[in-house]
Image: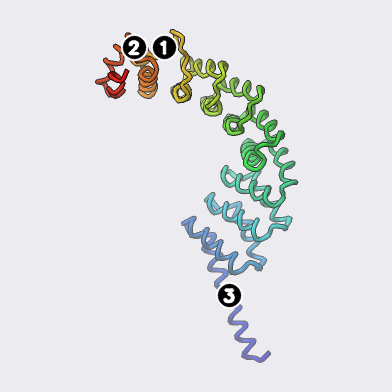
Amino acid sequence: MSGDDIRDLAVHRTAQNDAFGLVRAKASDDPDPRARKAAIAALVADWPGEPDTFSFLHERVVVDSAPMVRTRILRTVAKMWPKDKAAMALLRRSVQTDAEHRVRLCAAVELMRLEPDESLSWLHECVSSEEARTRRAAIVALCTEWPDAPETLAALHVAATDQNDVVRAQAVMELGGSCSTDQQTLRLLHERLADSEPEVRVAAIGALRGREDAGTVECLYRCVTADDDTTVRTRALQVLSDGDLWPCHPEAITWLVERTARGPHDDIRRLATLLLAQRWAADRGIRATLRKLTGSGLIRPQWSEAR
């Protein structure tokens, strides 16, 4: 190699190092997370074999403030270094420690893609983690990749009684999507309708949508008439109304009529009025009540002559 070739190579390497430094600085210092995300993509595309690239990503996935950047880093690490033990350790750490749910879920999904057998047993361990956010990420990941596995259903049953209300709500919501018809699941969902947290009760109501057994209808009816949270009552009334499941006994019908007259919450009053119009407008007394409400804007007058 001639002296000129050596000088050209040195100039090229200097330029490369300068460019690497500029892109790396943008990936860490730019105030716009979208710019940092793009810089990280450029860094990996142009310098995939640079040792500093790997170590830099490991650092940024911990300290970057934007979930979208941390998510991009995790996907990049999983794609570029799928068999690297340090990369797998980074994904596991993110599942357990990242503050953002979507980042933890991203790490879990990448782990399951790269190490499905190991990830399944590891996620079941995470369901019992001391960190609530890890437990939540684990049950979502299990339901995403192994929704029909008996072990997943068992994990959901445990998580539905978790001490953390966010974990309980997530588990209850996932039980609704599991299409499980076993009595243990149904009984557990009924119990969650009396949970101390409204968020969990709302999740249980959603999970029971589509079930028409008498026990479920009665539980939802109690939510409508006795729960102390407006959102819970409204959601339960919506589910019963959509499924045409509102009880036909006199007490239930009277409750609807009373809500149209003095219901303090517009959504409940409107739902009660529409339910009466759809199912009991043929009743003379209810028909008179509906006539009074026609001009209020709560319902349209189209019910009157059609009945």
Q: Position of residue 253 (x, y in %)?
A: 41, 11
Residue 280 figure quarter:
top left
Residue 192 figure quarter:
top right
Rendered position, 306 above or below 25: above
Q: Position of residue 73 (x, y in %)?
A: 59, 56
Name the kind of residue labelled 1 in the image.
Ile
Judge left or right: residue 247 versus residue 6. Answer: left
| Residue that appears at 63% across and 66% down | 48
Residue at the disc numbered 3: 16
Describe the element under mark 2 as helix, strand or loop: helix
Q: Residues within 10 Å of mark 2 (few under 14, many from 20)?
A: some
Q: CA distance from mark 3 to mark 2?
A: 81 Å
Q: Position of residue 12 (x, y in %)?
A: 59, 80
Residue at the disc numbered 1: 253
Q: CA distance from mark 2 to mark 1?
A: 9 Å
Tell me which label, 1 or 3, sits earlier in the chain: 3
| Residue that appears at 29% across and 11% down | 288
Name the kind of residue labelled 3 in the image.
Gln
Residue at the disc numbered 2: 286
